[in-house]
Image (tube, rainbow, N blue to C red):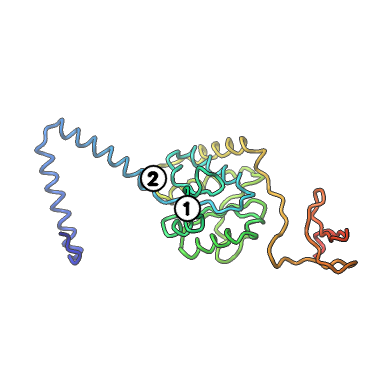
């Protein structure tokens, strides 16, 4: 029975003696047996290295930006196929909450474990209580996270609790530097969840470009209307009712039930 009160020096001595004993046993084996044992060790090491990637990658997003999450998944799986079982992405049933589990209870369990959180920041992200709660949970549990932005700038990321200076990458209208930043983040995220494989940056960039090209018709910023409870809205000058925000063609406008309209940039 293991004695939890032994000193560190005693533990080191036990391991040293164990290593010597193992070496003596191996030396008594035939050459064929030694080769078989070495092969078993190599296979075990490979399996062990793969199992090190046990941390999850959680993609926090608003559902109207799900195509950007699917892009991330396709990139991750092409760069490192074994990562598939470590991704949590609620907008894709293959990566979502297990059947029969409540999403909020499941996410609470996830945040207790090891996790790297990817934030897909968009304007609509801030209209979601769940998204904001996920941001707080990532900060409160000291998880590693990466900031990706869609239709906002890095300076628009909530300053607390998320660190807006922790740059990630832009996921829309990407230029050459954006592809490079994206690739660096993919590699960094894989390393953070325990993947020890080395990746060539240029190879990852090519994968990203290929996947972006496949989804180019789906990768656009969603139409956005502010929906927070306390948004600033004008009062109709004619009937004095509160006006609501609507899209009229391409433009956001405040509209009253009486028919009065105002451009949404008046405030």
Is the residue 90 above or below the residue 228 in the image? Answer: above
Rendered-image quadrant of the N terminus: bottom left
| Residue 197 percent location from the top left of the image | 40, 42
Is the residue 174 above or below the residue 264 in the image? Answer: above
At horizontal 47% and vertical 59% (from top left) the residue drawn is: 108
How crowded is the residue under tag 2: few (<14 C-alpha within 10 Å), some, or many (20+)?
A: few
Q: Which residue ends up furthest to the top in the rendered image? A: 32
For marks 2 and 1, give the CA distance: 32 Å
Callout 1 secondary element: loop
| Residue 83 percent location from the top left of the image | 44, 43
Q: Which residue ends up furthest to the front in the rendered image? A: 100
Residue 54 appearing in the image: yes
Q: Is residue 34 left or right of residue 141?
A: left
Question: What is the number of the mark on residue 101?
Answer: 1
User: 144 or 225: nearer the eye?
Assistant: 225
Rendered-image quadrant of the C terminus: bottom right
| Residue 238 percent location from the top left of the image | 90, 66
Residue 255 is drawn in which quadrant?
bottom right
Question: What is the number of the mark on residue 14?
Answer: none
Residue 176 is drawn in which quadrant?
top right
Callout 2 secondary element: loop
At horizontal 63% and vertical 57% (from top left) the residue drawn is: 125
Question: What is the number of the mark on residue 196?
Answer: 2
Numbered disc total = 2
| Residue 27 percent location from the top left of the image | 11, 39
Q: Nearer the viewer, mark 2 or mark 1?
A: 1
At horizontal 44% and vertical 58% (from top left) the residue drawn is: 109
**For the residues bearing labels 2 and 1, Cβ distance under 8 angstroms:** no
Disc nearer the start of the sequence (2/1): 1
Residue 188 appearing in the image: no
Q: Which residue ends up furthest to the right in the rendered image? A: 238
Q: Is residue 47 left or right of residue 85?
A: left
């Amino acid at each position: 029975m293991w004695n939890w009160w032994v000193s560190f020096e005693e533990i080191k001595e036990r391991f040293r003696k164990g290593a010597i004993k193992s070496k003596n046993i191996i030396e008594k084996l035939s050459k064929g047996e030694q080769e078989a044992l070495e092969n078993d060790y190599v296979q075990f090491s490979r399996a062990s290295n793969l199992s090190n990637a046990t941390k999850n990658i959680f993609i926090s997003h608003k559902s109207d930006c799900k195509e950007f999450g699917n892009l991330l998944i396709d990139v991750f799986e092409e760069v490192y196929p074994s990562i598939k079982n470590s991704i949590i992405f609620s907008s894709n049933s293959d990566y979502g909450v297990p059947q029969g589990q409540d999403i909020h209870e499941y996410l609470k369990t996830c945040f207790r474990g090891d996790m790297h959180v990817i934030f897909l920041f968009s304007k609509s992200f801030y209209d979601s209580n769940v998204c904001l709660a996920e941001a707080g949970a990532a900060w409160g549990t000291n998880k590693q996270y990466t900031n990706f932005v869609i239709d906002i700038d890095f300076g628009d990321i909530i300053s607390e609790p998320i660190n807006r200076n922790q740059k990630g990458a832009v996921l829309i209208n990407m230029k050459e530097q954006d592809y490079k930043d994206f690739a660096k983040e993919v590699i960094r995220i894989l390393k953070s969840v325990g993947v020890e494989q080395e990746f060539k940056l240029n190879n990852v960039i090519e994968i990203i470009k290929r996947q972006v090209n496949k989804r180019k018709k789906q990768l656009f910023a969603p139409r956005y209307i502010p929906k927070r409870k306390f948004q600033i809205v004008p009062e109709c000058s004619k009937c004095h009712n509160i006006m609501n925000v609507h899209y009229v063609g391409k433009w956001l406008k405040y509209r009253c039930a009486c028919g009065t309209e105002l451009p949404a940039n008046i405030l």
